[in-house]
Amino acid sequence: MRISEASLLDMDIDGYDHHLILNDGSTWFVNPRDLVKLAEWVPSAMIAVDCCEDNSFFPYLLTNLDNDVSLLAMKID
């Protein structure tokens, strides 16, 4: 189920807290297994946020609409 769409404002793939920030103010912790995918994303890309699994540690699917690459994440704000 699509929750929202926003552009990618900033991301940090170095260090322990690999996260990204969307221009709607939301901050997302990215599944460490998906860091390789996140490295392909660039600021200003349009990101779709979908709910995928309520009982998962990473219950959201973030999809880069510019290159159709998806990753799992958890909202941290």
Image: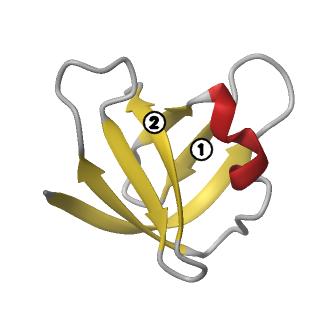
Is the residue marked by circle 2 packed among few (<14), some (14-19), or many (20+) residues within 10 Å? many
| Residue placed furthest toward the bottom | 66
Q: Residue 62: image x %, image y %?
A: 43, 54
Looking at the rendered image, the quarter that the N terminus falls into is: bottom left
Say whether marks 1 and 2 touch (CB < 8 Å): yes
Secondary structure under badge 1?
strand
Q: Is residue 6 above or below residue 29?
A: below
Tell me, for residue 43, which label it has, or none: none
Position in image of residue 42 (x %, y %): 73, 69
Q: Please state which amino acid type lies under the numbered disc 2.
A: Ala
* Residue found at x 66% / y 53%: 10
Q: Residue at x 37, y 27 (%)?
A: 77
Is disc 2 placed on a helix, strand or loop? Answer: strand
The tally of labels here is: 2
Q: Residue at x 30, y 21 (%)?
A: 56
Which numbered disc, 1 or 2, marks the residue that appears first in the sequence?
1
- Across and down, in percent, residue 41 comes to 70, 64
Mark sitting on residue 73: 2
What is the quadrant of residue 73 in the picture?
A: top left
Residue 44 position by quadrant:
bottom right
Q: Is residue 10 above or below residue 28?
A: below
Choose top left, top right, bottom left or bottom right for residue 67. Answer: bottom right
| Residue that numbered label 1 is attached to | 20
